Image: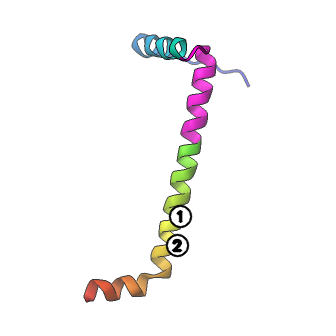
Amino acid sequence: MAMTLRLPAELDAALEAAAEQQRVSKQSYVIGAVERALRQEDKTARVLASLDETSERYAGLIKRLEDA
């Protein structure tokens, strides 16, 4: 799907420089950045869900350790 991205001049200049350094188009650079951000968010969500599950599973043990 097509999308127009309007950036402040400073950010556009930084994007231009980063894309040139990587020898890719600005569009390719942005696509890569969005993909990395989405993967990181997914990873963070999975870690937080695992922590919640572990906290629930071992709540009694954690409480006993607090009281020790």
Q: Quadrant of the N terminus?
A: top right
Horizontal and vertical percent position of residue 14:
44, 15
Q: Which residue position holds label 1?
A: 49
Residue at the (57%, 37%) spot, across then down? 36
Specify the amino acid type for callout 2.
Glu
The residue at 55%/30% (across/down) is 33
Q: How is the image coloured?
A: rainbow
Rendered view: 22 above or below 45: above
Q: Are marks 1 and 2 in contact (CB under 8 Å)?
A: yes
Q: Is residue 48 above or below residue 64?
A: above
Q: Which residue is drawn at the image coordinates 52% and 72% (left, top)? A: 53
Could you say which is closer to the camera, residue 1 or residue 48?
Answer: 48
Q: Percent x, y for residue 34? A: 58, 32
- Badge 2 crowding class, 10 Å Cα cut-off, few under 14, some 14 to 19, many 20 or more, is few
Q: Looking at the figure, which quarter contains the C terminus?
A: bottom left
Residue segment shown in magenta: 22-38
- Residue assigned mark 2: 53
How would you classify the magenta stretch by its main secondary structure?
helix
